[in-house]
Image (tube, rainbow, N blue to C red):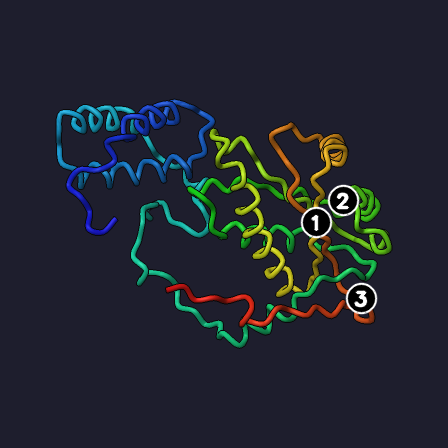
Amino acid sequence: MKPRRPIFALNYIEETIDCYETAASNENVCLDELKWATDVLVSYFEVIESTSITAPLRFRFNKARKYEKPKEDILDNASDTENFIPYPSKDLPDLEVTTEELSKLYMRRRSTRWFESRPVPSDSLLRAIEMASTAPSACNRQPYSFKICTHPETAQKISKLAMGTSGFSDNIQSLIVVVGDLSAYPLERDRHCIYIDSSLASMQLMLALETMGLATCPINWPDIEEREQAMQDTLNLPKYLRPVMLIAVGYPDLEGGIPYSQKKPKEILAEFLN
């Protein structure tokens, strides 16, 4: 926050330390998450004024702190000396993509329903998912996952659960089921976040695949309990994992038709408020 107050976060710092102590003592904790928590708390206690509340919490943190990341677990894109803390905007990488080039990518990505009968490389799907994970997410919870099916017969069977795919479902070569995780949110008021966050990531996913020569078609998931149950049974999903959408993926049939999609003019979409 700007300007930073000399004392802040008192409403939840004790709860945070409670969670940190639990995580630090868990042998199965994600080391990257633990490093992030450690770096942020180190930074916090460096800048916060010492009070009767913060002093004992600092002591507890230092006692619980035992982070040491094994070399084999170091992320490819981050050295072990890098701090996982907020950084200034000036440190963001330079942008080489022009607005016109980005617009061309947006125009090229169109819902494709006709694909060539050839397999989609798994490494391409995983690379696109990695890129999709950089999408914004409320509190960085990333409450979604991607269930990938590269077997055409199974992909076609799953796609038919969504309805609205008759006529082209038998042409689908690969399918991704986007699943939201309701367990990421303890409060009912936040249950809609799985749809917002997974949709943001899904758009980045489809654009990433387009740059790899792979076409996509997002498929609406109906809010019908019978269909929800069928998908849960098919993918063995617990109740807190809910389908958000399906995405067909494949190499486009160059002779396959792309529906013309008339977009609303900006004069209708945009309204400036005083």
- Cα–Cα span, label 2 and label 1: 7 Å
Looking at the rendered structure, the secondary structure element under dot 1 is: strand
Q: Pick whichever, 263 or 5, lies toward us.
A: 263
> What residue do we see at 60% from left, 61% from top?
207
> What residue do we see at 36% from left, 61% from top?
92
**View extreme (bottom): residue:** 100
Residue type, mark 2 in image: Ala
Q: Pick whichever, 182 or 132, lies toward us.
A: 182
- Cα–Cα span, label 3 and label 1: 22 Å
Looking at the rendered structure, the secondary structure element under dot 3 is: loop
| Mark whose residue sits in front, 3 or 2 | 2
Asked if labels 1 and 3 touch by Cβ distance under 8 angstroms, the answer is no
**x, y percent for residue 159:** 78, 46
**x, y percent for residue 28:** 47, 27
| Mark whose residue sits in front, 3 or 1 | 1
Which residue is tagged 2?
162
Which residue is tagged 1?
220
> What residue do we see at 38% from left, 49% from top?
79
Q: Is residue 120 left or right of residue 204?
A: right
Q: Earlier in the sequence, mark 3 or mark 2?
A: 2
Q: Is residue 86 left or right of residue 215?
A: left
Residue type, mark 1 in image: Asn
The mark tally for this picture is 3
Which residue is tagged 3?
253
Residue 218 to residue 47: above or below: below
